[in-house]
Amino acid sequence: MTAHSIHIEKTTNPKQKPASNQLVFGKYFTDHMFILDYEEGKGWHSARIVPYQPITLDPAARVFHYGQTVFEGLKAYLTADEKVLLFRPEQNFKRLNRSNERISIPALDEELALEALRQLIVTDRDWIPNEEGTSLYIRPFIIATQASLGVSPSLQYQFMIIMSPVGAYYAEGIHPVKIYVESDYVRAVKGGTGVAKTAGNYAAGLKAQEEATSKGYSQVLWLDGIHRKYIEEVGSMNVFFKISGTVVTPALNGSILDGITRNSILQLLRHWNIPVEERQLSIDEIYEAYSNNTLEEAFGTGTAAVISPVGQLLWNDHQMIINEGKTGELSKKLYDTLTGIQKGEVEDPFGWMVEVTDQLVRANG
Ligand SMILES: *Cc1c(COP(=O)(O)O)cnc(C)c1O
């Protein structure tokens, strides 16, 4: 604790909290935020929690011009007995540092980041909603702040954490989504930045997302950038297919994001002795499985929705209705188990949950 002294300035003007049933994803923010500065030669310094507020940046700040920025997303949950739990938070800061590495941002002290998050959650604890399906979404991010044009790594940065109470992802319960298989635009290629959680990947995907939405599809399924053939991922989710009893997901090939939900789902499936494969998977193979009735289920995985069943895929002229457009049995079981573990209602055999108290402790240990 003494190693990480974090100055706390509390707000004198707390905001009105939105009602639990009015929460919209990422619209409302808590009373406080965390800030840490970086300067070449000095390192990361001046850790502080301050009232949530706009930040002032020079128009020449490099983040605006060259997109040198990374982010993370995780959630805090309030249990029935009023404990605050985090799901594998150390994994988020490990991944943030892997993203940093790719985008030439100096590494962050993961212990300091976790302690900052803990203190920020304690400060804004009253903001964690407690209705079924709600949680506190946490967005850590880093921006390049050096005020000078020139394409080279910035010499100054800010790391911030902001938090937003969010409602149930599925207002009317878990339901399947329609997905558009994108054959023209691509998201990432091996050697590019697809493995990093960095803004440019999302900016590059907006056009395809917009076109898919206008056709009545909720998300885009990306194919590989070279052959436009191999499955990559869906929007901000990794993707799984159940074919003839085996669950298949694209291997971490250097262009998709290493999702923490993906990793957890793989562990759960192996724990249940369900056959899983991480490998190259083509859209032709999916279409063939669909055509011979062996494509049993499809679902996306990510922090926001946890599990998002796919009811329909459109690939060129091929319309595939999966599991009659209904949520599959395995998708439902994975959703119930993972959200149950996150809420502290289902046994956590993996030691994933971390409790926020005067320190961070394993919830089951
Ligand atoms: C964040 C993200 C995911 C999901 O990662 P989780 O750690 O499971 O939330 C998948 N794909 C992309 C592109 C993402 O940005």
Image (cartoon, rainbow, N blue to C red):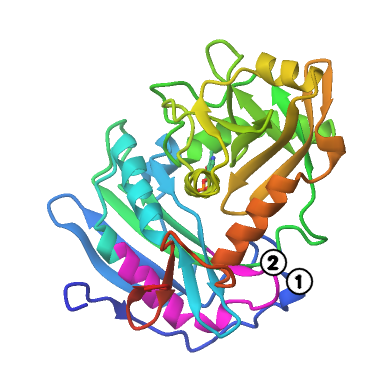
Q: Is residue 70 above or below residue 220?
A: below
Cα separation between marks 2 and 1? 8 Å
Residue 33, compared with residue 271, is above or below; it is: below
Q: Is residue 181 left or right of residue 121?
A: right
Q: Does the residue tagged 1 have its C-beta within 8 Å of any atom of ligand 1? A: no
Query: Which residue shows up at 27% across the image and 65% down it?
Result: 112
Label of residue 167 in the image: 2
Query: Tags 2 and 1 in contact by the CB under 8 Å rule?
Result: yes
The question of residue 331 being in magenta is answered with no
| Residue 136 x %, y % | 56, 69
Check the image and name the residue furthest to the right.
Answer: 324
Ligand 1 is within 8 Å of the C-beta of the residue at disc 2: no
- Which residue appears at 40% of the width and 44% of the height? 69
SS assignment at label 2: loop
Residue tagged 1: 22
Mark carried by residue 89 = none
Query: What segment is highlighted magenta in the picture?
Result: 113-137
Q: Answer few, some or many: residues within 10 Å of disc 1's Cα (few below 14, many 20 plus, some between 14 and 19).
A: few
Residue 134 in the magenta stretch? The answer is yes
Amino acid type at circle 1 is Gln
Res. 176 in view: yes
Q: Residue at x 45, y 75 (%)?
A: 121
Q: Position of residue 76 (x, y in %)?
A: 52, 69
10 Å crowding of disc 2: few (<14), some (14-19), many (20+): many
Number of numbered callouts drawn? 2
**Measured from the top left, where is residue 195 in percent x and y?**
43, 34
Label 1 sits on a secondary structure element that is helix
Q: Quadrant of residue 319?
A: top right
Amino acid of disc 2: Gly
Quarter assignment of residue 126: bottom right
Q: Is residue 1 left or right of residue 355?
A: left
Q: Name the one closer to the observer, 365 or 250.
A: 365
